[in-house]
Image (cartoon, grey):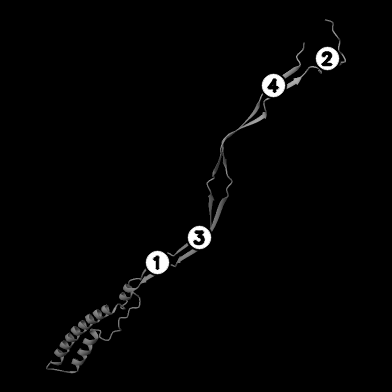
Amino acid sequence: MKPLIEIKTVPITFEFKRTEAQFKPEETTAELEMHKEKGSLQIKSRPIKLNIDTFETKKSAGNGSVFDSVKSYAAAGREAAYQATARYGQEGNILMDVELNDEAFQQIADLRLGNNEHKTPNIKWIPDTPPDIKWEPGDLTIKYEMDKINFDFKQHTTPLKFIPGDIEFIMTQRPEVIITYVGGPLYVPPSADPGYVETEE
């Protein structure tokens, strides 16, 4: 006789899903600052410097300083005084002669002309010493600075976002017991079955 029922079991089913832990950088913005420095132009000029020292030149021509003039005039005065003293002495000797005649005055005149008292003054126009000339060359300095542009790039530290890992269990099938009746219909009494065949005992 065949079994009337069939029993079937369905096991439980799980789906395993795993997510790895990770560091994810977050989006940030950078900053750029720009500064402009204006250039400059500097021009420095120094002209030629000429120094002319004419002290010795003037001195050699008789046009020295006040001190030199006083010193020269004093020396000339002493010499004139000495010459006048000598001349007056000589002329006095002539005039004291006992036999004074017209020749005495001629002698005095010749004496004065011999001493060259009426000579042309000694005037010097050309100096003996040339002027001392010194010169320094000129100078021209040009300093030019171009405009400057300074860039300051600021980048923030990129933060990292931590995403923890995850393990997920998903039950896709519950456990089941399936019972199936595989037999035919039951008739009571059995003689109601259309295919009933009475058996002899």
Q: Secondary structure at mark 2?
A: helix
Label 1, secondary structure: give it.
strand
- Residue on which the image places disc 2: 190
**Separation of disc 1 and disc 4 at Cα?**
125 Å
Q: Secondary structure at mark 4?
A: strand
Q: Residues within 10 Å of mark 3 (few under 14, many from 20)?
A: few
* Disc number lying in front (3 or 2): 2
Q: Are marks 3 and 2 in contact (CB under 8 Å)?
A: no
CA gap between label 1 and label 2 equals 155 Å
Q: Position of residue 134 (x, y in %)?
A: 37, 67
**Residue 9, disc:** 4
Residue 47: quarter of image: bottom left
What label does residue 135 carry, if any? 1
Farthest-out residue, top: 201
Q: Earlier in the sequence, mark 3 or mark 2?
A: 3
Alpha-carbon span between mark 4 and mark 2: 33 Å
